[in-house]
Amino acid sequence: MAAVAASSCAASFAALSISGSSSSARPVACSSFVSVAPLRSCGFLSTPLSVSGGVSRCSVSRRVVVIRAMADPVKKKKEDSAVKRARIAEARRIYNKSRKTEIKTRMKKVFSALDEMKKKGASSPEEIKPVEVLIAEAYSIIDKAVKVGTLHKNTGGNRKSRLARAKRALEIQLGWYTPTPSS
């Protein structure tokens, strides 16, 4: 495949010639023409070059390839920014994980306190006050997690609803709360 491309490129060097005032410049030709203005002197060339004919897609000489490479730089994303993004993502992952763990811990405390009350058979509605304090703390942590984006707002609402339903189920079971029938 490379031999075919080289032979077709060599065959197309017929009508383009590059010449300079120095003796080292040699004429080169190409069959596909694109008209261009004469090349001006560059910092690394001691003499100006002139083009007669046109320039094709294949490279004419090493000097022309260098000129093209200098004229069209390829912008790449900094490698450091990828490392920075990975570092920030890891820090956020740890931060979010700690918030989620705290939410789970608070919810377990509420559920275990409700289970103890259920087993013990609490006699007065005043005994549920410590559980309400735990529920309030859990609500606060859930709301903060939703605010900073650790949890979606619907997920936060579902967690809070689970806590409220568990408390209401205990109150109904112990006879402290009677739901009104919906009409």
Image: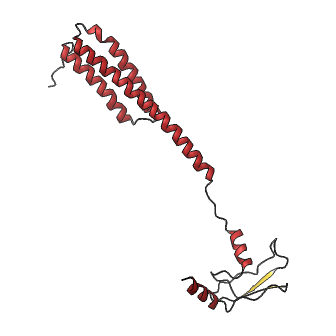
- In the image, taking residue 123 as reference, residue 78 lies left or right, namely right
- In the image, taking residue 99 as reference, residue 165 lies left or right, namely left
x then y, percent, for residue 108 = 34, 24
Vertical relation: 31 (above or below) 86: below
Quarter of the image where one finds residue 9: bottom right
Q: Residue at x 53, y 38 (%)?
A: 91
Vertical relation: 34 (above or below) 90: below
* Total count of labels: 0
x then y, percent, for residue 70 = 71, 69
x then y, percent, for residue 121 = 21, 11
Vertical relation: 119 (above or below) 2: above
Q: Residue at x 74, y 77 (%)?
A: 63
Quarter of the image where one finds residue 131: top left
Could you tell me which quadrant the C terminus lies in?
top left
Colouring convention used in this rendered image of the protein = secondary structure
- In the image, taking residue 96 as reference, residue 36 lies left or right, namely right
Quarter of the image where one finds residue 115: top left
Along the line of sight, which residue is nearer the eye, 122 or 32?
122
Along the line of sight, which residue is nearer the eye, 120 or 164?
120
x then y, percent, for residue 89 = 52, 42
Q: Residue at x 67, y 65 (%)?
A: 73
Q: Residue at x 55, y 41 (%)?
A: 88
Vertical relation: 168 (above or below) 74: above
